Each structure stands twice: as C-alpha cells, then as structure tokens.
Amino acid sequence: MTVQTERQDSRPAEVRGVDGGGGRPQRRAASRARTTALAPYLLLLPALAATLLLLGWPLVKNGLLSFQNLNMRQLIQRLTEWNGLDNYAEVLSSSDFWRVTVRSVLFTGANVVLIMILGTLVGLLLARLGKRMRLTLLIGLVLAWAMPPIAAVTVYKWLFAQRFGVVNWVLDQLGFHSMADHNWLATQFSTFAVVTLLIVWQSIPFVAINLYAATTTIPKELYEAASLDGAGAWKSFTSVTMPFLRPFLYATTFLEIIWVFKAFTQVFAINEGGPNRLTEILPVYAYIEGFGNQHFGMGSAIALLTIVILLALTAYYLRIVLKQEEDEL
C-alpha cells in the first residue's frame, strides 16, 4: 500500500508569495506600513483637538464679537447688533490705539534686549562655574522662574512701596534722603522701570538655562583646537561658542518677543495701566476698553488687531533670521 504525503514547497519565500496564500503576508505588510505612516498624525490628533477646542473656538467667538455692537444693554436684553467693520474703523482711526501700539513695541524691544543680554551672560556664567555654585545658581533661577506672576507682582509692589518699601529704605540709608517717600508708580517712566525690572527678572532664568544647555553640546575639542591656533578668550567665543549658540538665541528671542508683548498680568497688576493710562500696552488697552468701559465689541477688535501686530512682528523677525542664515550659507 502506498501512502501519499504532502510535499513541502521548497521554493524561496519571495517566489511562493506570488501565488496562492502568499498574498496574505504582503497585504499584512502593506497594512502595517500604512498604519506606521499614519501613526504620527494619529498621535497629533488629541493635541490638535485640544488646541482647536481651547484656542480655536474662543478665537472664533472673539472674531464674531468684534463685528458686533455689544455693551451692557445688549447683554441684558440679549440682543445681537451687527455693525460690520465699525469697531475696526473706530479703533484704527483712534490716536490712542496707535500711541499704545508704539508704546507696546518699544516696551517689548527694551525688555527683550535686556533679557537676552543678561540671560546670555548668566548662561555663560553657569558654564564656567563649578558644580556646587552652578547648582546653587540654578536653584535660584528655577525658583525665580517658577514664581507665579501675581506673587512676583506682590513682592515687587512691597519692595517699591512708598512708605514702607525696602528700596526706599535702602536708598535713604545710603544718603538719598529725598527717596525716603518716593512714589515709584507716580510717573510713566518709573512705573515702566519697575515693570521692566520684574519682567526681566522673571525671564532671565529661561534664557540662562536654555543657553547653558546649549553650551553643553559644544565639543571641547573645538576649544582645544582654537587654543592651539593661538585664539584668545574672545576669539574662541566668537569662532566656537557663538556659531553653536546662534540657533538657540534665535529661538529664544522669538519666544521672548511673544511673551513680553502679551505681558498683561505684570503691567495690569502693578498699576492697572496707570498713572492716567500712560503705561497701557495693547493687551491691557484691550481689557480696559472691553471690560472696563464695557465696549466688548471694541475690546474684541483691539484683541484681534493685537494678534495681527504680533504676527507681523514675529514674521519680520523670522524673515531677518532666515536672511542671515542664507547669507551665512
């Protein structure tokens, strides 16, 4: 009696996959490839949905309000009065808006310059210090950075208080007796000085820690080669350190422009844009016009124009950065 057994296919796997059941593994491989290609987009979906919900919808509502005449009467009577571009026309024709805009740009520029210079110096100092001193300075920077803005404003208002402020007391002890009862919030310049000191103090840690982290990526061999070529400290800094730090400086400056331009909390909590609304920047101006004067449509229009101005400033800065990078190439 002859027993027939099934003979195994001895052909290579690539040949067997062309016919019969071999197409199934190929379909599985193609399905896995499609899933792998879609994985990054699927992972971004939760963040994208949260962004659209938390930022996109309020922005749309704010845009709709900017085309309405909305005050307390409309809110009480639940009326919707569309007035087209009247709010934008009124804002753009107002000299106060342009005065506040120029003030906001100058305020942002002065703060960002101070933050980047001092933050870069502190970051380079961190790279030079020993472990213990570096750890101590890092702890101090993190504590300053982690302090909530309102808490920091409260501390600074106490430091610069007219009667019992520490700053006035120290100046009086040093012989400046006219500063014993000085009101730092009485003039535009001194109020901006206090606000600038607060914002710079809170922003330096981010720049310093970021720049210190960037210095750790610089190979030490480059400094050794520069010293063998006779380069001094300044030459090593300009030829070795700066090329590595430049991308970090660009990115950090970009972030600081955004953060300082919308520094509503510090400016409003210090003196509510006073004295006589002389220290208002655009976010504070939008809040006071919208909620303070109960012109909600006007405030929404100012808020959207603030976003447009900020986008224009950042686009101009990015254009300069990209042009410099092209010139270097």
Image (spheres, rainbow, N blue to C red):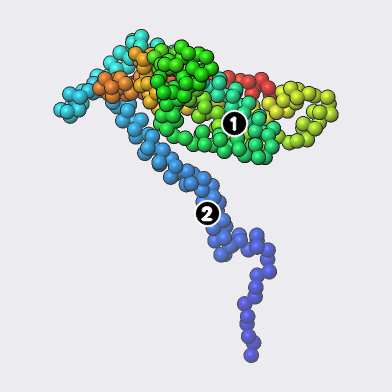
- Quadrant of the rendering where the C terminus is positioned: top right
Where residue 293 is drawn, which disc sits there?
Answer: none
Residue 23 image offset from top left, x and y in percent:
56, 60
Residue 105 image offset from top left, x and y in percent:
47, 16
Most extreme residue toward the left is 77
Hey, what amino acid is under mark 2?
Answer: Ser
Residue at x-position 60% and y-position 22%: 117
> Which type of secondary structure does the marked residue at label 1 adopt?
helix
Hey, what amino acid is under mark 1?
Answer: Ala
For the residue pair 277 and 133, the one nearer the viewer reads as: 133
Residue at x-position 44% and y-position 29%: 155
Residue 192 image offset from top left, x and y in percent:
45, 17
Where residue 31 is drawn, which disc sits there?
Answer: 2
Residue 262 location, quadrant = top left
Q: Residue under circle 1?
A: 208
Residue 274 image offset from top left, x and y in percent:
36, 17
Residue 133 location, quadrant = top right
Q: CA distance from mark 2 to mark 1?
A: 47 Å
